[in-house]
Amino acid sequence: MSEIKIYNLRIVPSPPVLDDVENFKSSFIETFGKQPLSKSKPHITLAVFEMDSKYQDILVNVFNQLSSIKKFQLETKGFDIFENNANVLFIKIPLTEDIKLIHKNIKILWIRDLHRKERTIIIPDVPHMTISKTYNNKTLHESLDFFQKMNYPNKHFEIDHLTLISRPHGKTWDWEHQIKLS
C-alpha cells in the first residue's frame, strides 16, 4: 500500500556535538518547559519534500549518488534565533562550500533523475540545529540569553554520512536510510 510521506534529508552530527545538542535540549526543557521541537533529534536539514512511498526504492537509488561526495567538516558557531512567527532557538552552522555542493547535487538529482519540479522541494538556505521552538517571543529571547551566557565554544565535527528519513503526515519518523560519503 502506498501513501504520501514527508521526507527529510539531513546531517546528523557526530559526538561530541550530538551529545552537546542533546544536553542543550534537556537544559532548555528543564529551564523553559517542553515546547515544540525541544525533543527532536539533533540534525541539520538539507532538504524536505513529499513523495508517494511506492517510489521510495527509486528515491534511495537516486539519492545514493550523493555517496560520491567526500566526507567533510562542519563547525558550530554559537546560538541564534529565527523570529517572525518561527520562534526557533538554534545553533548556527556556516553555509560552507560542502553544503552548497550537496544542495546543488540534490537539485540536479531531483529534476534530472526524479523528474520533479524544483518548487516541490524545500532546501533551507540557513544551516542550523534547532534547540527548540517557543510558544512566544519572550521565551525565545530569554532562552537565547540563557544559552549565550554558556559561552559554548565553536566545535568542528566530521560528516561521513547523510540520513534520509520519512514519516506519514502527523506521525513520527518511521523509516531511515543512511548514505555513506566517500
Image: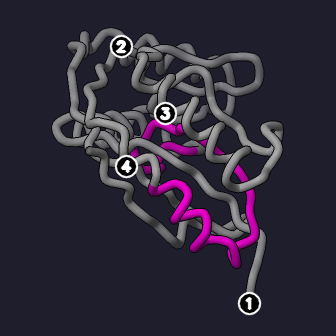
Disc ID at residue 102: 3
Which is more toward the observer, 4 or 114? 114
Left or right side of 98 for 13: left
**Does 43 lie within the magenta span?**
yes
Looking at the image, is mark 3 or mark 2 nearer the viewer? 3
Horizontal and vertical percent position of residue 11: 40, 42
Which is more toward the observer, 68 or 132? 68
At x 71%, y 66%, the residue is: 5
- How far apart are the alpha carbons under marks 3 and 4? 10 Å
- How far apart are the alpha carbons under marks 4 and 2? 29 Å
- How far apart are the alpha carbons under marks 3 and 2? 23 Å
Horizontal and vertical percent position of residue 149: 31, 9
- How far apart are the alpha carbons under marks 1 and 3? 32 Å
Range covered by the magenta-colored residues: 37-64
Amino acid type shown at disc 3: Ile
Instruction: Return the residue at label 1.
Output: 1
Instruction: Return the residue at label 4.
Output: 67
Looking at the image, is mark 4 or mark 2 nearer the viewer? 4
Amino acid type shown at disc 4: Ser
Looking at the image, is mark 4 or mark 1 nearer the viewer? 4
Q: Residues within 10 Å of mark 3 (few under 14, many from 20)?
A: some
Which of marks 2 and 3 precedes in the sequence? Answer: 2
Q: Tag 1's secondary structure? A: loop
- Discs 4, 2 touching: Cβ within 8 Å: no
Instruction: Return the residue at label 2.
Output: 78
Q: Is residue 32 visible?
A: no
